[in-house]
Each structure stands twice: as structure tokens, then as C-alpha cells.
Amino acid sequence: MDDLLARVREYIKFERNDDYRELVKKLVADNNDAELKRLFGHRLTFGTAGIRGCMGPGYGQMNDLVIIQTSQGLVSYLIETHGHQKCKERGVIIGHDARHNSDRFARLAALAFLNKSIPVFYCEHIIPTPLVAYGVNLFNCLCGVMVTASHNPKQDNGYKVYWSNGAQILSPHDKNIQRHIEEPENQEPWTGAWRHECLATSSSLYQPPSSPTDRSLSASKLGGGAGIPKEFEPLFKPIHGPLSKSYFGYIQRIVGDQRIQNQSASISITYTAMHGVGHTFLTRALDLAGFDEIFPVEAQKKPDPEFSTVKFPNPEEAGALDCAFQTASHANSTLILANDPDADRCAAALYDPNTQAKRVLTGNEIGALLGWWSWFCYKRTLDSGPPAASSSPFLFNEEPQDLIKQQSSGSTSGGFHSFGQKPLKEPKDCYMLSTAVSSRFLHSMARVEGFKFIETLTGFKYMGNTAHDLIHNRDKLVLFAYEEAIGYMVNSEILDKDGISAAVQVAQCAAHLKNVENRTLESHLDWLYQHYGYHYSINSYFICNEPRTIRAIFHDIQSDYPKSFTSAEQPSKEFKVTRIRDLNNGFDNGSPNNKASLPVSGGSFMVTFFVGEEIQFTIRTSGTEPKIKYYSEIVSKLPDASSVTSEAMQLAKAGIQAKLKCFLDAAIERCLKPSYYDLDAAA
């Protein structure tokens, strides 16, 4: 208790928010030990490439002081790792979304770097998360910081870090940054750490520029009152304009010669930004791709940190796309595209104006479609050879290199990284990636088509760094990567999920199928299942707010791994487990010496059961939410579509689905015991 009170006193000493200080003082006066322990018992620690939590007082929540300490720790680690001179030569990029306090948190982060004479390439307007990942390489930065809580509830915010390769940080960087954060010299705010107002733009936080291609503000136009300190002027580089221009050049390279076909398809698209930052960017990207029938969900079009029309701003959640379906009904749209609030995820749904039929595609279904589309486009390029290089890979008269030079005047500057044309590779040197909880569809397709497939741990921090290693250390080509939680990397110029470019590719795939194959996305999934096997998944979660209960559940599993699962309703149906992989303790009886080949984490739980070659079932804890997530999939061969009726095909699918559901009921009851542990199922 003495240690806890010492942390509380330290917090009161450092904190500048009077409301927070008084609240904490009252907790001390009231002897509210439980609440003090919640706020100060544990500091927010780096997890999914950064920190994320509820905004409020204390070291266990997101607030100005925690942002300052986190940034000071990150600065300290960068200097230790790269040397101060290299940090001053290359700098960092910082961006933010439209959540409450995101702009202020971003400015506070920038001050920590500026105070150590490290240049900051600053996104002065709200921006999608993937543009920060893209900007790390574009400006040759040592790291990137994005202030966002992605699709979390409105009371949350976060701080995501990218390393110098443009991918999310991995261990040991996260642990080392945490160590530096907790060093005494980084706990106390440095001189000038609170003066974030001097970096504020004159534009309103929630009013993005009329176009993402607008020229950014110069440093001399920033700030209110006294304005930006003179010592920061050569270091503080607003880059929204050149970053956006370069990014849209990247979108044009993805579109290639597909624009005319996209236009002729006349696809009507409804789009929702889910109250986030995506609208200006995706509508511009779709326009560049040749799609001109775009109908935004007006109620969700503008950035709104209250997320006023949805309970959870996550396109995956039940009911999140209700407004989009209403808009699609009025506009007669057949395709719905959605981003989460920071636009790094992409959801898609189908609507039939004639029958009013609705279908929300799962993350695995979108992954199958985009995986096939990536491979189809690459094979087409292999057959025809690469297109002639354009005289300019960008869409505008003024090259981003020139704009960056203008922004970087002064004694230090960041270099511009030119991406260039990647050389073509044979299929054996081409790779696709997905995570251990995603569908095995890419693996099935790889075995047929001859490219390589790699499975990683959950999260783009693993896939992004794996892709970087394949490209830069092994001279391979990475065509596509995805995770079932609607995250897609459609081009390795961005080593992270990108909801903008993914949405463009979904639309382009739909246009090609309509024009050339006379298929819809839905009917093309059936075609894919004929060629590569029927992949059917059931994924969901249980909510559990008690860490002790979560530990008890997994310790119970580990004490006696199930050798089979038997259905209570159909006792004759027994599903024998042929392999178990536990990435908490490293056990895998399908690998040599019973040791898992994937990285092991003692701080989280993830157990996978394999039932022959057909069924796979994984349960794991979440790194950002109080959930126990489960993932199940069955892979089975369908009858030849040319030899059976459509009714017989539906019966075959129904039988496969029923088999997975029977297994899943038994597996959940045996492993999670929802009634015994009082778990709340997903809505």
C-alpha cells in the first residue's frame, strides 16, 4: 500500500489537470483503496504495438501525463538504439484520429521529440492510421506514432508505434520502450512538456481540409497566441499535403489500367466511415479508381468522437451496418463498404435491390476474395509483363519530393524514399500471409497455385515484420496478407492493414467479376470453394471482466487437454483431437519435441485444437478487450457443381455447416464452460 500511495503522490505532483488532481485527492481522503488500486496499481503497458485504454486520471488510463511519459520513454529508447545524431537526421512522423483528445495527445507527443531536437513530420489534420505507417518509409523516419484507439468505444484512446521499417513494433522493442518509460528521468515531464498549444493548428480539430490533397499549413501559420517557438520551427514539419499526395499516387499504382473497366461496371457503392476519418480519403480513392456512384451514409460521414449512431464503432459488430443498409436501399447500391474510425480496417456487405436480401461478408470471406484477386492480378502481370513506367508515379504536377524539400528547410531534413517498380518473381518466390486464427483458405489456394503461404501469430505486427523480412532479407515478393478481423494488406508498400486500399481492391474485384466473369462477389465465393475447398467459419467471443476467471479457464484446459469432444445432444458424434498447440506454454504435439514453432507468450493465452485435416478450433484472450475469443473452421470438398442441382449443393453445404456447429457446441462447453464461469456471450 505504501508503494501505491507513493505513486499516487507522484502523480498528483506531476499532473497539470486540476480536475484529475482533485478527483485523485478525494479518493485518497475517502480511503477508496479499490479505486486507487485500479488507477495506480498497474501502469498501461505496451501490448498491441502500443498502449490503449480508457481516458481518465491515473497511470492505468490514458491522459496527458501518461502520453508525456510514454513519449519521453520512446524518445529515450530511440536515442539509446540509434544514437542522438541519427535521430536528429531522420526524425519521426506523428498522426492522430478524430477521437476526444487525440489532437492534444499528438501535440504532447511531438513536444517530447522536439525537446530533444528530433524533427517531427506532423500530420496536422486527422488522418487514417495506415498513412502514418506509409509515411515512416516515405520520409525515411526512425519511427511513427499514431494516436488512435481504432474501433474501441468512445471513452478509449491509444498510442500506436511503428518502427523504422514501417511495421508495428515487436518484442523486444515494446519491452525496452516500457523500461525507458518507467525510468525516473522520463517520469517527470521535461521542461516545456505541457505547452502543446504552441503546436495547435488554426483549423478546427474535426474539420478536415476540403480535399486531402490541399497544401498543408506552413509552420509559420501554426499555433495561437505566441505561436511555435523559434527553436522548433526548423524541426516541426507539417506534412499532411505531401503525405496525402504521395498516398494517392500509391492508390493510382494499385488501380493501374483497371480504371476504364471499373467505370464501365457502373457499380453503385454505399460507404460509411463509421464516424471516423475515412470519408475524405476513400471517396477520393474510389474516384481515382473510376467509381463515380458513391453514396455516403450521411449520418456517419463526418468525424464524430461520440460515435452517435452506433453502440460500438466496429463494422464487425451486430447492427453496425444498419444505417449503411438503409442508405443502400434508397440508393439501389449493390455493394457496401465500411471502414472503422481510423480507417485501417475494411468491411464489405452485399445488398440486392430487387429482393432486399442482405449479406455481411465475414473477414475470412473478404480475405478469400482479396487473396484470389491479388493472385489473379499478379498472374495477369506475369503473363503480360510489367506495365511501362509512367513518367510520374504521382497524380499531381508538383512532385512530393519537391514539397517535402520545401517543408524540410533548415539544418535537418528527412529523406524521401522512392518505392519504384518491384521485379516480378516466379510463383515459388511469391508469398501470402495470414494469422493463426484466420481461415486456411490462402493455404489451400497456395497448394493449388504454387505460391508460398506463411502463418503468423495474431496481429499485423507479426505479418508486417514477416513481410519486411521476406522482401528485404530473402528477396521474396509478398502479394497479400490478412487477418480475419477485417484487416488487409493489399500491397507491401504499406506493411500494415489499410482499410482504404483494401476497399478499393474489393470494388475493383467486384467490377472485374461483373464485367468479365458475369459473377457477383457472392457467386464468386462459390466458385472459389469449388476450386480450393469449402471453408466455413464460426467466430465469436465471450465477455469476461475478471482476469482471474480467464486464467482459471485456461489453466483448467492446460491441466488436462481434451483428447476428444462429444456432443451432449448427439453423444454418438465424437470428434477426436489429433493435435494441440498451446502458445502460452509452447506445447505442440504436432511438432518435433512437442515444441511450437510459432512464438510463445507467457502473458497471454492461445490454444488450438486440430481435429484431423478438417476442423480447427482456437480460443484466445484479447490484448485490448475483456474478451475470450474463439475461432472455428471446417474445410471440406464440395460435390462438382456441374453434376448436381443447386438444391443438392445447398444441402451439401448445410451438412458441412451442421457438422461444425455440432463440434463447436461441444468444444465450447468442454473448454469454456460458459454457465459455470458466468460468461456473457456476444450479442
Image (cartoon, helix red, strand yellow):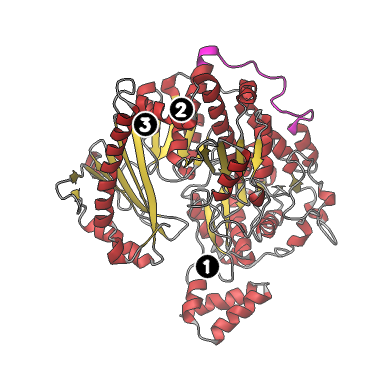
Q: Which x, y percent locates residue 447?
A: 35, 25
Left or right: where 132 falls relative to 587: right
Q: Residues within 10 Å of mark 1 (few under 14, many from 20)?
A: many
Along the viewing direction, whichever of 37 and 475 lies nearer the viewer: 37
Circle 1 sits on which residue? 60
Give the distance between the C-alpha atoms of the residues marked 3 and 1, in whole angstroms.
41 Å
Q: Quadrant of residue 434?
A: top left
Q: Which mark is residue 488?
A: none
Q: Position of residue 377 (x, y in %)?
A: 52, 22
Is residue 164 at all visible to an observer of this figure? no
Given the image, on which type of amino acid does mark 3 rest? Answer: His
Q: Circle 2 sits in a helix, a strand or a loop, which is it?
A: helix
Residue 128 lies, in percent from the top left, at 63, 45
Identify the image quadrant of residue 183: bottom right
Position above or below: 39 against 300:
below
The foreground one among 210 and 325 is: 325
Residue 97: percent from left, percent from top: 64, 52
- Residue ID for mark 2: 372
Which element carries disc 3, helix, strand or loop?
helix
Q: Which residue is mark 3?
A: 443
Which of the 4 image quarters holds residue 431? top left
Query: Which region is colored magenta?
Result: 382-400
